[in-house]
Amino acid sequence: MDGLKSVRSTYLYSQINKNEVLDKNIRALLTKGVALKAEDVTTQINTITSFYKGVLKTNVLEAFEKGIVEARCFPKGITAEYKIPNTFPFILVPAGNDIKAVAIVDNYVSHDKAIDKINIDTQKFYTLLETAYVARALQKDPSILRMGQVLSSSAGIWAHMFTRLLNKKLALNIDKKAFEKVLYLAAKFYLLNLLGLKATEVTNNYAAKLCKNVERITLQRIDQEFLAHWVSEKRENDSKNPYDNIATFIQCLSTMGVLISTGLHDITVRDYLKDFIGMYGNAALLALEHPSYFIFNIFSAVNGAFLNNQYAFKDIIARTGMDVYGQICLRAKGR
C-alpha cells in the first residue's frame, strides 16, 4: 500500500499557498531560521524530564537532541517579513535517505531582551515536538493508522468533526438517519482520501459502523447516488471523483444534499471552511485533508496544549481520542 500523501498535494495547501508565499516562507524558515538547541530550552526540557509521563517522552527528547526532530523559529527581527500560519505546526523534509521532522514553534515563542533567550510554554513545546515526531513515524509507516481500532476510531472522530459543523447549522441530528448518512460519507472520505485506502466493501463496512439507524441497503444506495450526482453535475475539467479533495467532497454533498436533509444544498466550500476555522481554530484546518495534521489536533486536545480550539476538539474526541492517542504513541515509539 502507498505511503501517506504529501500535504502539498492537498486542495487546502494550494489555497493557502497563493502566489507561492507559503513555499517562500517555508524555504526561509529552513535556510534563515534558527533550530533551537537543548541549552535554549533547558527549563522546558527539565520540566518535561521531571514531570511528564507520556509513552513517547524519552523518544521525543532523544530525537530532539539528535536533530531528527527540530524546533525552528525565525530569528528576532525578521518575523514581520516571514510568517508561517499556525495551520502548519510542523513540516517534514528530506534528510538524505531519511526524513527530518521540523516543529514550527515560531508562533509560540517570545524573545527576551537577554541575548539568545527564548520563552515558550512547555506544554505547547512538547506537543509540537511530539506531533512532529509522530508525523515522521506515520510517513515512514502509514500502517500505524491503517490497522484495527486506530483506523476505526480515528474515522469516527474525523466524521464527527466534519459533521458537527453541519449539525450546528442544520440541526441534522433531529433526523438520526440524515445525521448518520452524512457521518457515513464523511468516514468514507477520511478512509479513501486521508488514509488512501481503496474503495472496497471492507472500507464501506468501517464507515457503516457509525450508522445504527440506517439499513445497509440504504447506505449502498447513498453510495450510488453520491457518485451519480457528482458525475451528472460536474463541469468540464472537474474531477471525476468526489473524494478527490475536501472541495469536491463538500460540493458533491451539497449537490445531492436534498436527498439527505433540506439545507445541505445551500452549503458552499467557502462558507464551510470559514465556519470550520471559526469552530475549531485555524490550526485545525489541515485536519480536513491530511492525517498527520488531523492526529496533531487530537494530540493537542489530549495534551491540553490549546494549540487549537481545545474545547471544541475535546467535545468531539471524548474518551475515544485518549485511546487513539495511546495506541498511536505505542505504535510510533522508536520509529
Image: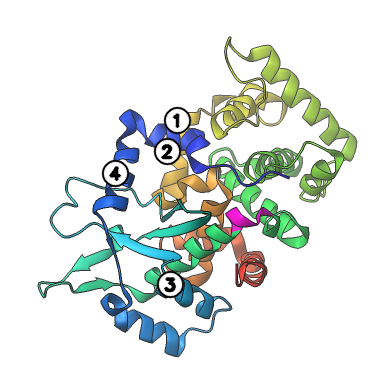
> SS of the residue at dot 2?
helix
What residue would you read off at disc 3?
Answer: 66
What residue would you read off at disc 4?
Answer: 25
Left or right, residue 184 beside residue 298: right
Mark 1–mark 2 contact, CB under 8 Å?
yes
Q: Earlier in the sequence, mark 4 or mark 3?
A: 4
> What residue type is disc 1 on?
Arg
Q: Is residue 277 above or below residue 316?
A: above
What residue would you read off at disc 1?
Answer: 270
Tell me which segment is drawn in magenta. 138-142
> What residue type is disc 2 on?
Lys
Label 4 vs label 2: CA separation? 23 Å
Q: Is residue 125 above or below residue 175?
A: below
Which residue is depicted at the point 47% across and 38% down?
8
Q: Earlier in the sequence, mark 1 or mark 4?
A: 4
Which residue is depicted at the point 46% across and 59% down?
101
Please identify, in this view, whether the residue under mark 1 or under mark 3 is nearer the observer. 3
Q: Is residue 91 above or below residue 236?
A: below
**As rendered, which of 162 and 190 lies closer to the eye?**
190
> SS of the residue at dot 1?
helix
The x, y position of residue 90, in whole percent, is 42, 55
Q: Earlier in the sequence, mark 2 or mark 3?
A: 3
Label 1 vs label 2: CA separation? 6 Å
The x, y position of residue 172, in whole percent, is 64, 41
